Structures are given as structure tokens and as C-alpha cells.
């Protein structure tokens, strides 16, 4: 910046946007006539990112030292950026990509197929795996250790078969119901995923909020404590009060911070508090660990205020865990219950005994979940825990409309959703699929994912011989192999083909 050839003019982010200028390493350039290279695809990539901070791409394409080139500066420099570009105007962080990979990903990102070509939620995942920066893909796709639970979450659904009823008039089916008192058009919800700007700087939680309401199909959105957009912006983006928004709470070691946060989300009109109880520390996620991460330039809104505390080199989730209190216990939950009028649901319950305990405490519900296979590897598939929990609640007279069972983990199909509902779930969460849908297409992707799942649920309800959600029950399922983990199952090609295996350490030569 101190180079004499950069004009000492201060340029605001607003001016960069208005003029479609480009920010590289704190300096502002007008690259509309940029042509000084023998590489037309690199030029195409630079020009397709006007109005943004492209430092990451520029360094990956031309190397840091290329900026020592006074001719480039003389020709294109406008001045020095005052402050920073807004986070949605900073290109994704490429860390370990080769030059060719950066070009390829930038081109793919602008060559997505039309939404009409997307026929199931795996399509989003597959597309995202091709263009997301390594760092983002590693963070989202990673499970813990050997990723046994990650895959088991999904595979367990293959051990449940249906016993359809025939000769039922299924000309009309209704997939709507209520979740925590609000009507939903299909009993699914967007499970919280942190740091959505990693998946797409321009489309984050605000776009999920829009996608969950604007097509006339409402489903709840669970908003992460570590969301990239502010809670204010996300709540402002919902279509109406008919659209439910829930807050996923990570409890801070400083309870004052958490109490203030609860007050804030109450005031903003969120409908429920989902307290995460399965993260005393983050699981050992090796894909994520392989990519060095610092939240310095891509953190969630809560962490940015305390930037110094979050600088770490241990992967995305590890960098944020110091905001989570490992001493959290049942007594804290009892305290929270006294301090908020919001329904409290515990997220991350993994055994029937804890489901029973939550019901006994008079909580609003639980999410049976192993955190998408990202915490304790070999935690059982949530669908297995659900099947075990409902009879235990019934035995104790604790099964009631005031205690709702939610489940997440591994759900990709309408039939997965129906199996969980038959087993007693009130609502079914999907995290990664919505994250990838949003990364690819923003709110339209989220809408599309919802409508695809609704269609799958409707079709399967008809084929199952039911016309409303309250007709779903365990009598429609064959559970004889559910607990038999060694049962052989048909190869699930779409799942298997988007699954990328973990890798071993490489030599450095
Ligand atoms: O799964 C996660 O990555 C997650 O929930 C988390 C945990 C700690 C910090 C940020 C996100």
C-alpha cells in the first residue's frame, strides 16, 4: 500500500461497488480493461468478480509477487480501500487449490445447471463438491474420526422397510402439520449449520430464510449461534410471522453472554431455543483439520468481535469451540427454563434415558441427533435411538403432544422422512443438503430442495396408503433388521458417489 505508484486516494466500499472496481490486498483497481496476460480464462475469472475483494483469487492466479509490478499498478490502480469490503463482497478463500483448480471452480460456479435439472437433493451436494473451496468442502462434509457415524446415520434408514396399505383412496394427501405450535407445510426443518458464508459468501442464512417462506411453502429454519449473517438480518428476511425461525444456542462459558443472547433472540421474535448439548468440545474431524483455518477473514458474526481469540490453526470448528462451555450440565438447562419464555428443545440427544430425562424436566422436546456424525464417532444412528426412545416414553406415560421429538442426520429422501415420522418424530431436520442447495442457488435452491422433498413425501405417502401425517405409525414399518448393523444392503449409488473418502498423510517431497 505504501508503494508510490498507488494513488493516495481513499476509496470507500460503496465506490468499489458502484464502479465495479476490484480490491486486491487493500488497494482498489479498475480492471475493466485488464488484458495483460496470455491466459484468457484467468482474465475471465477476474472480470467475472467485479465489485469485490478478489485478493484470494488474484494471489492464487498470479502469485503474491505479481503485485510488485509497478506497471500493473500504474495502469489500473485507483487508490486505497478505506475499511473493508462487506463479507458478501469478498471472494471465497482459496487455500490449497492449484491455479488450475481455482480457474476451474470459478468457471463451474458460473455454469450451474438450471434448477429444473435438479431432481433430488444429492444433486446439490455433488455440484457443491465440485466448486466449493477445499476449506469449505472439508468443513461441511467432514464427520469425526473414521466417519462411521456419518455414514451410518444415512445407512440405518436402509434397514427399515415399509408395509404399504393398498386400496386406500389417496387422491388427496396433506403433508402439513404443526411444529412447536406453528403450521408447517411439510414436517421438515433446516437444521443449523455454522458459517454459511464459507459455502457461498453471497448467499448465507438470509437466503435460507427467504427460501423457507417465499414460495408459499413454509418450513422452520434453525439459525446457528455461529451464523455468518447477523440474527437481525436473518429474522428480517422471513416472509411473515407464519414462518418459524428457531435459534440454535451454544452456551458460552460466560453465562452473561448467553443470557443476553437469549434475551436478544426473544426480542427478535424467534420461536424456540434449541440448546446444543453434544459439543463439550468439537469432534476430531480430520478433513477439516487438514485444512488450516483462521477465522480472521471468514468468521461468523459473533466471532469477528473477538478476532484475536479465534486465530487458530486447527480447522474451522476447533477455532470456535472456545465460545462453547464444556461444563454445561442438566442444572444449567433448568436455569435457562426459568429465564426464558421460549420453548426449550435439547439438540444432540443420543440415548433413550436422556430423552426420558428431558421429558421429565418438562422441556418442549429433543432433537435426537449425533451432530451429523461430527461428534462422537460410533454414536448410533439417530433413527435407531428414536425407535428405542418412543416405547420408553410410552412406558412412563411421558409421550405427549407437549413434548416433541425431532431427529436429524443422514436424511436425504422422502422415504427417510416418512420412516422417522412413522417412528414418532414430529419433525425431521436436514443440515448439509440445505447448506449445499443454498451454496449453489441461494434461496431458489432452498425452495427447490423443499419442493423436491415435499414431492417425494407426497408420492411415498400415496404409495404407502396414507393421506395425512397423523396416519403415520410404526405399523407401516418392518423394523426387523433395524438393529442388525451387519445386514447387507443394496448399494446406494448416489450417496456413495458423492461421498469422498478421508485421506492419509502425504510425504512432502
Ligand atoms: O458441527 C459444527 O461444526 C459445529 O456445530 C460447530 C462447533 C463449534 C464451532 C462452530 C461450529
Image (cartoon, rainbow, N blue to C red):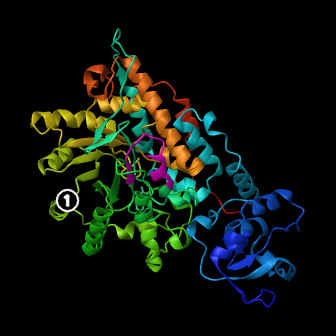
Q: Which residues are magenta?
A: 207-222
Q: Determine if residue 485 is in view.
A: no
| Residue depicted at 49% across the width and 75% down the height | 311
Can you give x and y, in whole percent of width and height, for residue 429 in the image?
A: 38, 43
The quadrant of the rendered image in which ligand 1 is seen is bottom left
Q: Determine if residue 359 is in view.
A: yes
**Looking at the image, which residue sits at the far left?**
396
**Looking at the image, which residue sits at the far top?**
167
Residue placed under numbered mark 1 in the picture: 341
User: Which of the pair 245/496 is nearer the observer?
Assistant: 245
| Residue depicted at 76% across the width and 56% down the height | 100
- Name which quarter of the figure residue 263 lies in: bottom left
| Residue 203 sits inside the magenta stretch | no
Label 1 residue near ligand 1, CB within 8 Å: no
Q: Secondary structure at mark 1?
A: loop
Can you give x and y, in whole percent of width and height, for residue 449 in the image?
A: 50, 39
Can you give x and y, in whole percent of width and height, for residue 213 in the image?
A: 44, 46
| Residue 219 sits inside the magenta stretch | yes
Amino acid at each position: 500500500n505504501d508503494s508510490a505508484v498507488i494513488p493516495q486516494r481513499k476509496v470507500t466500499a460503496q465506490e468499489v461497488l458502484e464502479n465495479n472496481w476490484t480490491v486486491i490486498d487493500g488497494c482498489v483497481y479498475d480492471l475493466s480493461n485488464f488484458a495483460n496476460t496470455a491466459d484468457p480464462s484467468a482474465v475471465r475469472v477476474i472480470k467475472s468478480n467485479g465489485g469485490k475483494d478478489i485478493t484470494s483469487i488474484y494471489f492464487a492466479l498470479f502469485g503474491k509477487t505479481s503485485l510488485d509490478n509497478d506497471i500493473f499498478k500504474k495502469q489500473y490502480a485507483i487508490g486505497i480501500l478505506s475499511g473493508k469490503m462487506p463479507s458478501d463482497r469478498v471472494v471465497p478463500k482459496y487455500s490449497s487449490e492449484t491455479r488450475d483448480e481455482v480457474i476451474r471452480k470459478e468457471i463451474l460456479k458460473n455454469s450451474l445447471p438450471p434448477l429444473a435439472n435438479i431432481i433430488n437433493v444429492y444433486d446439490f451436494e455433488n455440484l457443491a463438491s465440485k466448486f466449493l473451496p477445499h476449506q469449505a468442502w472439508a468443513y461441511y462434509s467432514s464427520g469425526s474420526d473414521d466417519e462411521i457415524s456419518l455414514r451410518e446415520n444415512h445407512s440405518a434408514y436402509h434397514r427399515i422397510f415399509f408395509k404399504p396399505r393398498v386400496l386406500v383412496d389417496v387422491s388427496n394427501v396433506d403433508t402439513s402439520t404443526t411444529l412447536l405450535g406453528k403450521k408447517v407445510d411439510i414436517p421438515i426443518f433446516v437444521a443449523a449449520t455454522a458459517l454459511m458464508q464459507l459455502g457461498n459468501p453471497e448467499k448465507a442464512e438470509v437466503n435460507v430464510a427467504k427460501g423457507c417462506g417465499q414460495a408459499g411453502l413454509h418450513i422452520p429454519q434453525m439459525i446457528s449461534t455461529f451464523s455468518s449473517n447477523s440474527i437481525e438480518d436473518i429474522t428480517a428476511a422471513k416472509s411473515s410471522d407464519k414462518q418459524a425461525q428457531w435459534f440454535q444456542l451454544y452456551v458460552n462459558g460466560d453465562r452473561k453472554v448467553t443470557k443476553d443472547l437469549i434475551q436478544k433472540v426473544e426480542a427478535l421474535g424467534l420461536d424456540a431455543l434449541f440448546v446444543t448439548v453434544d459439543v463439550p468440545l468439537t469432534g476430531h474431524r480430520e478433513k477439516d483439520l487438514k485444512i488450516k483455518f483462521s477465522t480472521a477473514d471468514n468468521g461468523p458474526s459473533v466471532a469477528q468481535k473477538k478476532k484475536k481469540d479465534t486465530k487458530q490453526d486447527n480447522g474451522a470448528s476447533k477455532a470456535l469451540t472456545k465460545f462453547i462451555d464444556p461444563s454445561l450440565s442438566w442444572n444449567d438447562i433448568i436455569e435457562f427454563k426459568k429465564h426464558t419464555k421460549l420453548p426449550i428443545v435439547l439438540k444432540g440427544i443420543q440415548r433413550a434415558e436422556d430423552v426420558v430425562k428431558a421429558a421429565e424436566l418438562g422441556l418442549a422436546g429433543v432433537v435426537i441427533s449425533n451432530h451429523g456424525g461430527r461428534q462422537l464417532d460410533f454414536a448410533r444412528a439417530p433413527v435407531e435411538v428414536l425407535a428405542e426412545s418412543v416405547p420408553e416414553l410410552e412406558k412412563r406415560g411421558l409421550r405427549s403432544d407437549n413434548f416433541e421429538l425431532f431427529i436429524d442426520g443422514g436424511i436425504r429422501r422422502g422415504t427417510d422422512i416418512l420412516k422417522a415420522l412413522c417412528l414418532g418424530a414430529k419433525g425431521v431436520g436436514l443440515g448439509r443438503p440445505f447448506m449445499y442447495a443454498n451454496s449453489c442457488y441461494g434461496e431458489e435452491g432452498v425452495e427447490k430442495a423443499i419442493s423436491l422433498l415435499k414431492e417425494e413425501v407426497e408420492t411415498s405417502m400415496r404409495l404407502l396408503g396414507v393421506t395425512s401425517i397423523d396416519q403415520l405409525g410404526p405399523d407401516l414399518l418392518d423394523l426387523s433388521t433395524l438393529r442388525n448393523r451387519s445386514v447387507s444392503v443394496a448399494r446406494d449409488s448416489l450417496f456413495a458417489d458423492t461421498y469422498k473418502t478421508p485421506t492419509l498423510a502425504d510425504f512432502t517431497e
